[in-house]
Amino acid sequence: MTYQDLRYEVRDQVAVITLDRPERLNAISGPMLRSLSAALVGANSDPGVRVVVLTGAGRGFCAGLDLKDQSSGEGSVAEEVAAGGLFDLRDAPPIVLHNMDKPTLAAVNGPAAGYGLDLALGCDMRILGSEAKLGAVFTRRGVLPESGGTWLLPRLVGWARAAEIAFRGRVLSAQEALDLGLVNRVVAQERLMDETLALATEIAANAPLAVQATKRMMRMGMDETFEANVHHVYLALLPLFRSQDFQEGMRAFLERREPQFIGR
């Protein structure tokens, strides 16, 4: 499939999705939104993909919605809405990203601001280069976190810290984000993709059905009681017991070797 303002490749069962407008710090255009949703849906349905990495080309992760496009109307999100392409929010990248079963990692290589911050927060894990910054600058632009940030940020750092970050329009350094527990790791800038792909490959080596079921149950558990979640986990466990990967995991344990999972 051909994507606009975005690159897609698969490396050893890891899909790498790269926002590709480096001259604009990968600011979001209307066509990029369509491409990103399509790439995420494709990765989630591809049996050859077990983990997804989202990153940006050049020196930025994503600077948010392209304000120049918004003011001119050319290639803007507003133009896409007017064309009827984005009325169904179920197809918008933040919703698609949230509903994905496969693990998602954000390799944040530079500024992630506005919409770009929400995309990073929407991933399961965030690995930041040492020069990256997270910009919750919505209130400085007269808007609010429109792409999941108001839901995600309080759950990640707690209400009081989320309120301070969002109300003040804070820009966080990589180290500040790590200290707040907002990201998983901060690594040397030149090692960012190597470290992220190593983590993604480690996850991809595990039984994919089990990883995806674990993610679904964790996501459901955010909005249900403990008892309900235990019940749902039990129901999710039954088909795993019948999978070939479960048998392979048991054999590998008894034979003291690394398992070779096939996703069935």
Image (cartoon, helix red, strand yellow):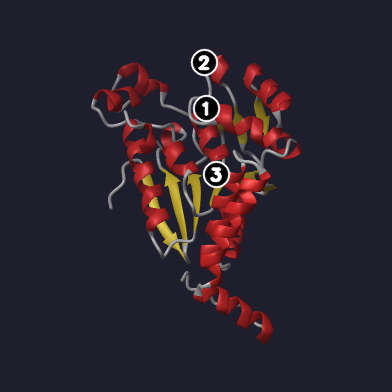
Q: Label 1 sits on what residue type?
A: Gly
Q: Nearer the viewer, mark 2 or mark 3?
A: 3
- Residue at the spot of label 2: 141
Sooner in the amino-acid sequence: mark 2 or mark 1:
1
Instruction: Identify the residue shown where x is 63% and y is 44%.
Output: 128
Front residue (pair 209, 185): 209
Q: Nearer the viewer, mark 1 or mark 3?
A: 3
Q: Position of residue 143 (x, y in %)?
A: 50, 16
* 239 up-or-down from 165: above or below: below
Give residue 123's mark.
3
Using the rendered image of the protein, determine whether residue 101 is visible from the camera's viewpoint. Answer: yes
Q: Secondary structure at mark 1?
A: loop
Q: Toward which corner of the image does residue 139 lie, by quadrant? A: top right
Sooner in the amino-acid sequence: mark 2 or mark 3:
3
Q: Position of residue 187 (x, y in %)?
A: 67, 49
- Residue at the spot of label 1: 114
Tell me: 9 left or right of 81.
right
Q: Toward which corner of the image does residue 226 lie, by quadrant? A: top right
